[in-house]
């Protein structure tokens, strides 16, 4: 179980860092530091690090966040189909195949081993798939990092509760990835 702060604005950068790097603690710490520097910059304060390094880190966090939110949407659809129908393998296979092609084209267009690219892509994203669903729940499109960090609409604490509900739903429909999902909780919900 991962405990997150009970404050909306303190939890936001930590949630984004968990989404961007669910398997790498060191990268999560760097991401939080870069987002803190970005917040300082938006307030007109001095950056703690070099501007080029902060920008590069933020671009990477944005890319990884977008990929995780996309993977969360695919996982959500798999859960809905499993809950609705016993013929979920057809959807699961077709969505996995389409996703494999998308990942392989971006990773290396000449790569003949698409299954390996897909497996590697999914393996590092598995722990936070439920959190990715919770963050996007109720939105018409995937949000970007700036909107998630600085939007006035509260979403962080709601997304933690929603992520736990989706994790339990994955366990209820016996999804193969359910055992790998991390349980997220806020200090307000302990």
Image (tube, rainbow, N blue to C red):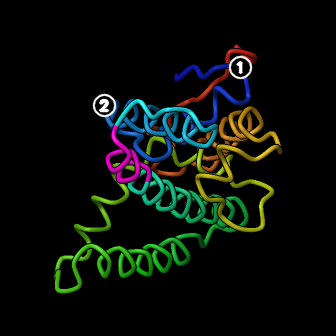
Residue 116 in which image quadrant: bottom left
Q: CA distance from mark 2 to mark 1?
A: 23 Å
Say which label, 2 or 1, has the lower sequence index.
Answer: 1
The front one of 151 and 78 is 151
Q: Looking at the image, is 34 positioned above or below residue 83?
A: above
* Residue appearing at x 75%, y 16% in the figure: 188
User: On the image, numbered disc 1 is attached to which residue?
Assistant: 6
Q: Residue at x 59, y 41 (%)?
A: 171
Q: Could you classify mark 2 by the number of other residues whose Cα lies within 10 Å: few (under 14), some (14-19), or many (20 or more)?
A: few
Picture coordinates of residue 32, whole percent (x, y): 47, 33
Q: Secondary structure at mark 2?
A: helix
Q: Which residues are magenta?
A: 50-58
Res 137 quadrant in image:
bottom right
| Residue 48 or residue 108, whichever sits in front | 48
Question: Which residue shows up at 56% across the image and 65% down it?
Answer: 74
Relative to residue 37, is residue 56 drawn left or right?
A: left
Side of 17 where 52 appears, left or right: left
Q: Which residue is mark 2?
A: 26
Left or right: residue 135 versus residue 178 is right
> Outermost residue toward the bottom?
110
């Amino acid at each position: 179980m991962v405990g997150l702060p009970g404050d909306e604005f303190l939890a936001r950068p930590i949630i984004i860092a968990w989404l961007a790097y669910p398997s790498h603690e060191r990268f999560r710490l760097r991401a939080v530091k870069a987002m803190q520097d970005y917040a300082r910059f938006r307030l007109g304060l001095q950056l703690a690090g070099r501007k080029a390094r902060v920008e590069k880190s933020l671009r990477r966090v944005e890319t990884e966040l977008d990929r995780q939110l996309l993977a969360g949407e695919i996982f959500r659809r798999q859960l809905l189909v499993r809950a609705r129908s016993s013929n979920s393998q057809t959807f699961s296979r077709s969505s996995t195949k389409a996703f494999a092609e998308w990942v392989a084209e971006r990773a290396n267009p000449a790569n003949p081993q698409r299954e390996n690219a897909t497996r590697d892509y999914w393996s590092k994203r598995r722990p936070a798939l439920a959190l990715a669903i919770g963050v996007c729940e109720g939105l018409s499109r995937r949000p970007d990092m700036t909107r998630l960090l600085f939007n006035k609409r509260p979403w962080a604490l709601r997304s933690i509760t929603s992520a736990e509900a989706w994790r339990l739903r994955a366990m209820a429909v016996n999804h193969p990835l359910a055992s790998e999902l991390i349980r997220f909780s806020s200090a307000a919900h302990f």
